[in-house]
Image: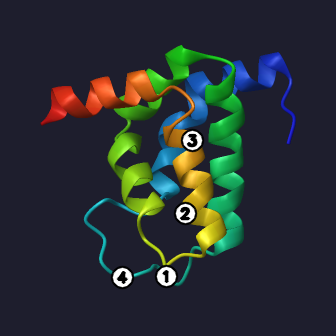
Amino acid sequence: MHLLQRNRELIGKYAMKDLVAKLPRADQRFRDPNVSDATIGAILGILFETVKHSADFTRNIHECGGTDRLRNLASSHPMYSSRICKYASQVVYIYPSFFFQFVARSN
């Protein structure tokens, strides 16, 4: 997936909260049947491309509650496919120092 710079900025500024809200909550024990792996994969792809080019958007993901959602999703196999779990891990570990810093602050 390739996003133009301007599109990444728009997503990072205006759509990040909505995208993160589509991910399963950290305390969610059962899978939502209305959200497919394809939908989650698309959201993770957009988040990956957005965060990959800007560490500031990593902070936005955390502020929207995305850190816990991504960490939970990364460890939710077999509820979600291994592909989705691996992809969630990749988003978390693009800027590991940021995510670990956020996790340390929230605990």
Comes first in the chain, label 4 or label 2: 4
Disc 2 crowd, CA 10 A, few/some/many (<14, 14-19, 20+)? many
Query: Mark 4 — residue?
Result: 30
Q: Secondary structure at mark 1?
A: loop
* Residue at 17 percent of width and 33 percent of height: 106
Q: CA distance from mark 3 to mark 2?
A: 10 Å
Q: Secondary structure at mark 2?
A: helix
Comes first in the chain, label 3 or label 1: 1
Query: Mark 1 — residue?
Result: 78
* Residue at 35 percent of width and 60 percent of height: 25
Q: Name the disc covering residue 1, or none.
A: none
- In the rendered structure, are the residues bearing label 4 and label 1 in contact, judged by CB atoms less than 8 Å apart? no
**Is 7 placed left or right of 80 in the picture?**
right
Report the amino acid beneath label 1: Pro
Q: Secondary structure at mark 3?
A: helix
* Residue at 42 percent of width and 70 percent of height: 76
Report the amino acid beneath label 2: Cys
Query: Mark 2 — residue?
Result: 85
Viewer-side label of 3, 4: 3
Q: Secondary structure at mark 4?
A: loop
Q: Name the disc covering residue 91, or none.
A: 3
**Is 85 placed left or right of 42 in the picture?**
left
What quarter of the picture does the N terminus occupy? top right
Report the amino acid beneath label 3: Val
Q: CA distance from mark 4 to mark 1?
A: 11 Å
Residue 27 horizontal/vertical position (percent): 25, 65
**Is 26 placed left or right of 42 in the picture?**
left
Disc 4 crowd, CA 10 A, few/some/many (<14, 14-19, 20+)? few
Report the amino acid beneath label 4: Phe
Residue 90 horizontal/vertical position (percent): 59, 45
Disc 3 crowd, CA 10 A, few/some/many (<14, 14-19, 20+)? many
Rendered image quadrant of residue 61: top left
